[in-house]
Image (cartoon, rainbow, N blue to C red):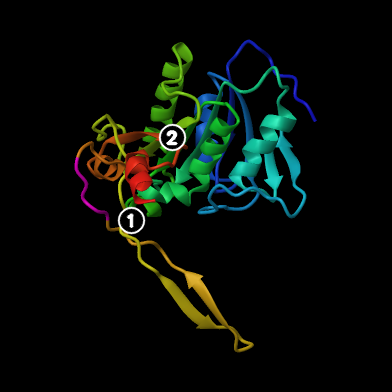
Amino acid sequence: MKLIIPYIMKRILITNDDGFDSPALLALIKVLKPIAQIITVAPTLEKSACGHSLTLTKPLRFVELEPNFYKLDDGTPTDCIFLALHKLYPKDAQPDLVISGINIGANMGEDITYSGTASGAMEAVLQGVPAIAISQDFSDDMHEKENFLYELATQTIKTIVEKIFEGRFPLEPRKFLNINIPATTPESSKGFKITKTGSRIYTNDADAHINPRGQEYFWIGLVNHEWRKTEGEMTDVEAVKSGYVSITPIHLDMTSHNDIEELKRWI
């Protein structure tokens, strides 16, 4: 399966981890269609917290819902990006940018290691394509607004994409932008902050239950919302909670470089 893609416009590949019918995904597609050639490949089902998982034990299938819009039955965001880059795009016409989102809920701090949204962007940069992960933070009252239109998130991503296409992607290879949108309106937003990742205080929240056959099962609960205070650059958490759009550069080298010499001495 190969697509014939016009070379007139820039090309963007979009995925998410909330599923192909997410209103946030549809809002993202709508705002970017006027400025780029869009192909969307999204999971059939919600894949929140699936991490950077690749499906190796069963076959996967593209299901075309409309031109240039596919759900991957039943894949992860990583599967979506991996297969789209290798099976939908010609080798000489790879996308100029991958965007993963708009995620319903923030992806900050170490949560990005769980995040399917961040992992979609991670897979893209592993494959040599610049990428952005974008997520929308929520307050309790915002969850009750059925007409929430992701205005600040869509305005932000349009601004960032236009800046990239007018110049260049601001990071080196194997690095991506992780953007988190505060729970506020465009009018109330304080602008952009370049941030580092925060540090969450994690707890083990799992509820035990008994099914009708008398077997015990567990339901993993929500993570703790407490964060550690850190020195230096403002964290993504601090920025978002203060009303700023947080933009964090993420790189895939997980080596603790500061500890190499000490570890040499220790061994």
| Residue 149 seen in the figure | no
Q: Amino acid under label 2? A: His
Residue at numbered disc 1: 140
Q: Is residue 255 above or below residue 59?
A: above
Q: CA distance from mark 1 to mark 2?
A: 32 Å
- Say whether residue 228 is magenta: yes
Instruction: Give the secondary structure at mark 2.
Output: strand
Q: Amino acid under label 1? A: Asp
Q: Is residue 135 above or below residue 5?
A: below
Residue at numbered disc 2: 251
In the displayed structure, does residue 223 sit left or right of residue 78? left
Q: Residue furthest bottom?
A: 214
Q: Position of residue 146 (x, y in %)?
A: 44, 49
Which residue lies at the image location 60% right of the left edge and 30% below the top edge? 127
Q: Secondary structure of the magenta portion, mostly?
A: loop
Q: Nearer the viewer, residue 58 or 29?
A: 58
Image quarter (top left, top right, bottom left or bottom right) of the N terminus? top right
Q: Position of residue 226 (x, y in %)?
A: 27, 58
Q: Residues within 10 Å of mark 2 (few under 14, many from 20)?
A: some
Q: Magenta segment range?
A: 227-231
Mark number for residue 8?
A: none
Which residue lies at the image location 45% right of the left edge and 20% below the top edge? 169
Which residue lies at the image location 71% right of the left edge and 21% below the top edge? 91
Q: Is residue 223 above or below residue 64?
A: below
Instruction: Give the secondary structure at mark 1.
Output: loop
Which of discs 1 and 2 lies nearer the camera? The answer is: 2
Q: Residues within 10 Å of mark 1 (few under 14, many from 20)?
A: few
Q: Position of residue 5 (x, y in %)?
A: 70, 18
Which of the 4 quarters of the picture holds residue 84? top right
